[in-house]
Image (spheres, grey):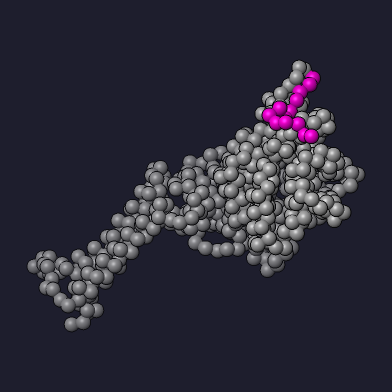
Amino acid sequence: MSLFDELKRRKVFKVGAAYLVVAWLVVQAASIGFPAFDAPPWVLRIFILIALLGFPIAVVMAWVFDLTPEGVKVAADTSGSKRLFAAAAFLIVLALGWYFYGQPSFRKGDVATPATPERNSIAVLPFANISGKADENYFSDGMTEELLNVLAKVPQLKVVARTSVFQFKDKGGDIREIGRKLGVTNIVEGSVRRDGPQVRITAQLVRVADGFHIWSETYDRKLESVFALQDEIAQRIGAALKLSLGVAAPVAARAPIDPQAYDEYLKGRALLRARSDLPSAIAHFKSAVAKAPEFAAGWSSLSLTYEVSFWYTRMTPAVQADFLAGAAAAAERAAALEPNAAATEHALGNVARAQFHYAKAEGHYLRAMQLDPGYPDVREDYAELLYEVGRAEDSMLAARQLVELDPYFVVGWVRLRDAASALDRREEVDEAVRRIRAINPNNWAGKFGLLDYALAHGRAEEARAALAEIEKTLPSEAASVRQLLPWGLREPGADGPALRATLANAPGNQASTYFVARQDIEGYNADIETRGAVLQAYYFANLYSSKPAGHAMLRDPRVKAMLVRYGFPAYWREKGWPAGCRPLGETDFECGIDTAPVH
């Protein structure tokens, strides 16, 4: 008799099939029941392992024991026994391999992933754009972000920040693996199709532990009711999670919005997030609030875009004044419409900081963080403010909390690099630069962060070595730095008209590093005066984070006058003085007391 016939005779196939069906049903019941009783994830994994190990054991027992009219007997040995036992042993090895490979200690990489995700954690993956038009990605991305923001307002629900989830946009992959990398127990995914005034959204809630679809639904709505649709989806997700997590989604109803205004808003948000074509982003937000004057999020986004534009656009003094006025007006309008929104407080904080009212800005940022603890953008500005006023340790702590909240938020790592550089902590600087390069290889701090760090602390050979590495790995990027570094190190023959043009055209805050390295007070003051209020708030930090050169410049009366002009002593008298600075009576102060003055 063949092995196949023998397997049929001994009912091995029937036993195996029956076991698989029963085991599948029991595992499904356990995956629902265990979370309801607060069982940790490892309990379900062990339960599934036991179920997997039971299958080869059941098959072997069906082969070994024969059910006869006289009762259960041990079957006579046949030539197929060895092959069946070998197959059973192989299945046992596979089950054990699945279990141990799934343990955090056996996984490589993803060091920031929590070993045990919080039960009340969720990630909203970027919704797929199935409209057939690539230029409408802004709409599906915007819907994802809006739904994420609504869910973030649910108490006790931990929602992964936008930047982290958008790392998985258009990449596919197993939901369980993505959930593990994000450190969550639940994932929302879906698709968006827009056709004129109509929108169809399909959303589904997936449990990460086993990929089980807890809930799924398709919605067809008119665009004018898009807010109601977002709220409805959030409420349905909350209801689906309530049994296992004990949380619900008490979402406040929002007024309908003009579809064209909302479309303009989403286009502006897409450009703002990408830091791309910010003048067009401003135009889109202006169009949105013109069509929907009561749309507070449009006003706050307009204000935030005005502020961030200072980093990406060289402006005349007249344009700078217009942008500051525009930011202030938009923030005030948002405050009148929605005073308890985190984005409103964020915009008000940025305006106060641009007016050199740092203590007031800090208050707005703290309130925004209280209103929405999961809002990473305001945490980034808060860490930046602390760095600007010389509270480097506090800035480091705030930046560390930010990258723990949103590990893929590259600007959070930039803030951590800045604070670590000011404190001269090499390990943290190296860590931040590595993460910046991994997330966004085009970021300036990733390319030149190690060179700037060495130059800020007067380590000339280390700076030259960093430049050599840049020339080797990024030859097209090295031209301007190859020109600026010898000048910053006061090497003979390094000055000239071409270099002055390079300094004048350097984006953002980059020229300051070289002026400070040379202890060129007149040049530094003149350059930063052209950069606008947003970068002028860096006046003290550029000096404080450079030692000994910058610290020595702080003792100069010309620098002291600029510190007063930019509002730093007023903040310090209220909040405390940074190391190296101290008050002299009620009206005077001095800084740089830990170094010799500039000669």
Q: Is residue 337 visible?
A: no
User: Residue 31: x and y, percent?
Assistant: 40, 52
User: Residue 257: x and y, percent?
Assistant: 75, 49
Q: Closer to the camera, 93 or 288?
A: 93
**Residue found at x 77% / y 34%:** 598
Check the image and name the residue furthest to the top: 585
214 relative to 83 in the view: left or right: right
**Residue found at x 40% / y 48%:** 41
Check the image and name the residue furthest to the bottom: 1
Q: Is 596 a magenta residue?
A: yes
Q: Is 47 a magenta residue?
A: no
Which quadrant of the rendered structure holds the C terminus? Answer: top right
**Residue found at x 24% / y 79%:** 4
Q: Is residue 204 above or below residue 14?
A: above
Start-end of magenta stretch: 587-599
User: Residue 497: x and y, percent?
Assistant: 87, 54
Which quadrant of the rendered structure holds the N terminus? Answer: bottom left
Q: Closer to the camera, 438 or 100?
A: 438
User: Residue 296: x and y, percent?
Assistant: 75, 42
Main secondary structure found in the magenta portion: loop
Q: Quadrant of residue 574?
A: top right
